[in-house]
Image: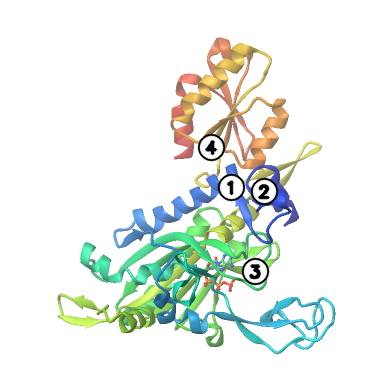
Amino acid sequence: MDKIVSLAKRRGFIFPGSDIYGGLANTWDYGPFGVELKNNLKSAWWKSCVHERSDIYGMDASILMHPKVWEASGHIENFFDLKSDCKSCKKRFKAAELSDHKKCPECGGELTEERPFNLMFKTHQGPIEDGSSQIYLRPETAQGMFVNFSNIMDSRHPKLPFGLAQIGKAFRNEITPGNFTFRTREFEQMEIEYFVRPQDADKVLQEWIDYRFNWYLNLGIKKESLRKRKHPKEELAHYAAACTDLEYKFPFGWNELEGIANRTDFDLRQHAQASGKDLRFFDDASKERFYPYIIEPSGGVDRSVLAFLADAYHEEKVKKDTRVVLKLHKDLSPVKVAVLPLLRNRPEIVELAKKIAAGLKKHLICVYDDTGAIGKLYRRQDEIGTMYCVTVDVQSLEDKQVTVRDRDTMLQERISIDRLEEYLKNKLA
Ligand code: ATP
């Protein structure tokens, strides 16, 4: 884990938040390659869950919502963890993580009784900070989709089964955040709310578990590092009838990457009751009105980025050296091609390399780098996970060819500059 955190900072993937002020605990900022990786991951999800299907509609709802949403959803009443405080050192602990419920794990002091601690962040809307202006930062993106159910019905007229998909920030005032970006108080979710006939819920839940499991595998996660874990009854959230987590074997152990739940008709019923709006589905064929059930695959963007980073991290012996390489899937790699001049003190070579890079940039994510000797440049690109390095040398000036190096095999091929774009596009397709 230390190696991943250090590489993430060294190479511009993820930095500690507010770093120059000593950091704000458990906040992280994505740097130049981190944001590309994260955007690629979100695009891959959107492609698989929205664009490649004809039964799912995309959405982007507000973070700030009417406070009644959280009353109806049950979050005000039920969305809490049990906490316990140390009477001597004042540290706060999540009760579920305490092995001895009487003594403080830090200083051995006496602990208070367990008390519920609501995880929602509160803030105020408008210039007056009184009770009537209090609102919440959403703790899940899901509710933004439920409250738009009738808007989607009226504007898109979907038939069952159909789904809504959304990627966006969520906030939880976690008692014990940690493990790098695994558990933070501000994070991004990618969620689908899939509406089905109640009698189909069990079957569709299973289909989504398999669909989402395979998505991770298709993007390169090792099979032995991914597993499904069905929740026992006592672990289910207040709205769920069933849930299976997809867990990844992080360096700190097996942990949840995504939860896939049968939320029943809980949310639509609650919102219908609280808003007074009819949120039932009208079935044209049978002329029946009923509440559909909801199957929800809910994943974390930041946790996925961390899992893909951990899974891609490789150390390899190359002659006497150790090569660190991020073997990210080609769709996720933050940089597809790096163009590197072999001799940076030869202006004709530098000029040709820059020209090639400028041409490629129109089609691929491409960087140009001439800030070191070639060995160092290769090492840097390997650590970023760059798929191909294109080297321009003296010979290139004459034969109009460049050397293309493959990240994983390190094999090199001479390719004509005319054919380079097509060659790379085929490789990355
Ligand atoms: P956990 O048990 O780890 O607290 P959860 O079961 O409360 O997670 P869900 O409510 O199912 O999580 O949220 C769906 C997804 O959102 C999780 O699978 C995870 O990927 C992501 N997620 C939830 N909480 C956090 C957090 N504090 N930091 C980062 N990602 C999170």
66 sits to left or right of 328: left
- Mark 3 neighbour class, 10 Å CA radius: few under 14, some 14 to 19, many 20 or more: some
Q: Can you identify the residue that label 3 sits on? A: 254
Q: Can you identify the residue that label 1 sits on? A: 34
| Distance from the alpha carbon under mark 1 to that under mark 4 | 14 Å
Whether label 1 touches label 4, CB < 8 Å? no
- Which residue is drawn at the image coordinates 57% and 16% (left, top)? 351
- Cβ of mark 3 under 8 Å from ligand 1: the answer is no
Q: x and y percent of residue 381 in the render? A: 64, 36
- Mark 4 neighbour class, 10 Å CA radius: few under 14, some 14 to 19, many 20 or more: many
- Cβ of mark 2 under 8 Å from ligand 1: the answer is no
Q: Can you identify the residue that label 2 sits on? A: 8
* Quadrant of the rendering where the N terminus is positioned: bottom right
Nearest the camera: 7 or 28? 28
Foreground tag (2 vs 4) = 2
User: As shown in the figure, which amino acid type bears the numbered disc 1?
Assistant: Gly
Q: Can you identify the residue that label 4 sits on? A: 336
| Distance from the alpha carbon under mark 2 to that under mark 1 | 8 Å
Q: Earlier in the sequence, mark 4 or mark 3?
A: 3
Location of residue 184 with respect to 419 vertically, above or below: below
- Which residue is drawn at the image coordinates 65% and 25% (left, top)? 370
Q: Is residue 157 visible?
A: no
- Cβ of mark 1 under 8 Å from ligand 1: the answer is no
| Distance from the alpha carbon under mark 3 to that under mark 2 | 21 Å
User: As shown in the figure, which amino acid type bears the numbered disc 4?
Assistant: Lys
| Distance from the alpha carbon under mark 4 to that under mark 3 | 31 Å
Location of residue 42 with respect to 113 vertically, above or below: above
| Badge 1 element | helix
Q: Which mark is residue 215?
A: none
> In the rendered image, which quarter is residue 267 located in?
bottom left
